Image (cartoon, rainbow, N blue to C red):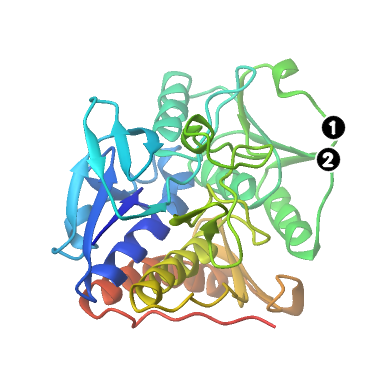
C-alpha cells in the first residue's frame, strides 16, 4: 500500500516521516529537492540570509522515495505530473502549501520564488523606499528585517489589530518605520510595494474537480479527509480549516493526517483533528522580537516577552520546527502537540 504525499513543506515532510518510520511505503512528490523554511523568508528578501533552504535529505526519512515533479491533476488512484507521467497511489495526502503571484504590480513573500523576485527588485533599487501593505506577522517581520538592512520602510494597515500587533507597530515606529492606518489600493502606490494581506493556494485541487472553498482550498472533514474521496486527505495551508495558516498548524495537521492513514490501515476510522495554540513568536529585526502567549483557541493571554529575550525565543522556536521534523524522521510518533480546549 503506497501513500503519496504532494508537497515537501512542514505538513508534507512531517507526514512522510511519520508514515515511513512506521514501515509505510511513502512517495513524496515535490518540485524541488529541498525544504524551505518559510518562516525565514522575510530575512531572505532584504539579503540578511542567502536563502531559506535545507537539503531535503537532512529532514526526510531516507526510506521515503522522492520524485521531483509538479502535479497537474489528481485522478482516480493516480497523479499526473507536468512531465506527462502518471503516478499510482493507494492513499494521497494533499499538502501543496500556499503561494501567490504578483498582484497589481506588488510583490509578495509567501514563497521562495516570490521572495527572490522581491530581493532582486530591492537590489536593483537600493535607495528606493518600500511600502508594505498589511500588518500581520508577515508584514511586521518584513518591515523589521528591511529596517535592519537599512531600508526606508512604510507600513500601511487598515486596523492596528489585536494587542500583539499594536505592540509590533509601536516598536517598528521607534525603529523608523512609518506606520499609517488607512485603506489603500496597492496598485496606486508608487515604488516597491509588498502586499502581505493574504495568500493564494495552487489550483491543483480545483483543476482536479475535488471539492474546494471559494479560495480554492481543499475541503476536508474533521478527520482531514476529502468528502466523497476516502483515500485523499489534506493538511497545511492549502486545506480549508478553522485554524490559521501557519507552520504551528501545518506540523500537527501533517502528523494527524499520518495517524489517520495508519489507523485506517488497521481498520479504524481515525480520530478527529484537534489542536491548541501556546504562543506566537515575531521577529522584529536586530535580534529583537515578541513572544505573545495564547489561549488554546488562539486568543491572547496577558503575558508577552519583548526585546532581545523575545528575539532569542523566536529564534529557538524557528530552530525547533526543523528539530521536530528530524526527531520524527528518527523516531516515528515522537512529535506531539497541545490538543486544545
Residue 28 higher or lower than 99, as above or below: below
Tell me the quarter of the image containing the N terminus: bottom left
Q: Which mark is residue 223?
A: none
Q: Residue under circle 1? A: 183
Residue 223 spot, x, y in % from top left = 55, 67
Residue placed most toward the observer, 249 or 239: 239
The CA distance from mark 2 to mark 1 is 5 Å
Residue at 13 percent across and 63 percent down: it is 62
Q: Nearer the viewer, residue 99 or 189?
A: 99
Q: Nearer the viewer, residue 226 or 139?
A: 226
x 43%, y 71%: residue: 260
Question: Which quarter of the picture shows residue 330?
Answer: bottom left
Horizontal side of residue 71 vs 260, given as left or right: left
Label 1 element class: loop
Give x and y (percent) for residue 54: 25, 53
Task: State how many labels appear.
Answer: 2
Quarter holding residue 82: top left
The percent coordinates of residue 311 (x first, y second) are: 52, 67
Q: Residue 122 in the image: x percent, y percent?
A: 47, 26
Name the residue nearer the viewer: 268 or 100.
Answer: 268
Image side of residue 309 versus residue 2, left or right: right
Taking 248 as reference, is 21 above or below it?
below
As drawn, the label of residue 158 is 2
Which element type, helix, strand or loop, lies under badge 2?
Answer: loop
Judge the density around disc 2: few (<14), some (14-19), many (≥20) Cα neighbours within 10 Å. Answer: few
Task: Tell me if label 2 and label 1 are in contact, CB under 8 Å.
Answer: yes
Density class for disc 1 (Cα within 10 Å; few <14, some 14-19, many ≥20) is: few
Residue displayed at 69% across by 37% down: 214
First in sequence: mark 2 or mark 1?
2
Quarter containing the C terminus: bottom right
Amino acid at each position: 500500500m503506497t501513500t503519496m504525499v504532494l508537497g515537501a513543506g512542514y505538513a508534507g515532510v512531517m507526514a512522510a516521516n511519520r508514515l515511513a518510520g512506521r514501515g509505510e511505503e511513502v512517495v513524496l512528490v515535490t518540485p524541488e529537492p529541498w525544504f524551505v523554511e518559510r518562516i525565514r523568508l522575510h530575512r531572505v528578501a532584504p539579503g540578511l540570509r542567502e536563502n531559506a533552504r535545507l537539503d531535503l535529505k537532512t529532514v526526510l526519512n531516507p526510506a521515503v522515495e522522492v520524485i521531483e515533479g509538479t502535479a497537474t491533476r489528481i485522478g482516480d488512484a493516480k497523479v499526473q505530473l507536468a512531465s506527462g507521467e502518471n503516478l499510482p497511489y493507494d492513499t494521497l495526502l494533499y499538502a501543496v502549501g500556499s503561494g501567490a503571484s504578483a498582484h497589481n504590480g506588488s510583490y509578495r513573500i509567501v514563497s521562495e520564488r516570490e521572495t527572490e523576485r522581491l530581493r532582486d527588485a530591492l537590489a536593483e533599487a537600493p535607495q528606493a523606499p518600500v511600502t508594505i501593505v498589511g500588518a500581520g506577522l508577515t508584514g511586521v517581520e518584513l518591515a523589521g528585517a528591511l529596517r535592519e538592512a537599512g531600508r526606508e520602510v512604510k507600513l500601511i494597515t487598515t486596523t492596528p489589530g489585536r494587542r500583539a500587533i499594536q505592540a509590533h507597530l509601536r516598536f517598528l515606529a521607534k525603529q523608523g518605520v512609518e506606520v499609517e492606518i488607512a485603506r489603500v489600493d496597492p496598485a496606486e502606490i508608487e515604488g516597491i510595494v509588498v502586499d502581505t494581506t493574504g495568500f493564494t493556494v495552487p489550483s491543483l485541487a480545483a483543476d482536479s474537480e475535488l471539492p474546494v472553498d471559494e479560495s480554492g482550498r481543499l475541503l476536508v472533514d474533521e478527520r482531514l479527509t476529502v468528502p466523497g474521496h476516502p483515500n485523499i486527505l489534506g493538511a497545511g495551508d492549502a486545506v480549508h480549516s478553522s485554524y490559521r495558516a501557519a507552520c504551528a498548524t501545518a506540523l500537527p495537521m501533517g502528523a494527524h493526517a499520518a495517524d489517520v492513514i495508519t489507523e485506517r490501515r488497521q481498520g479504524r476510522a481515525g480520530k478527529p483533528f484537534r489542536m491548541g495554540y501556546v504562543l506566537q513568536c515575531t521577529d522584529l529585526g536586530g535580534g529583537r522580537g515578541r513572544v505573545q502567549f495564547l489561549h488554546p483557541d488562539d486568543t491572547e493571554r496577558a503575558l508577552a516577552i519583548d526585546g532581545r529575550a523575545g528575539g532569542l525565543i523566536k529564534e529557538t522556536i524557528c530552530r525547533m520546527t526543523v528539530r521536530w521534523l528530524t526527531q520524527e524522521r528518527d523516531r516515528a510518533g515522537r512529535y506531539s502537540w497541545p490538543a486544545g480546549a
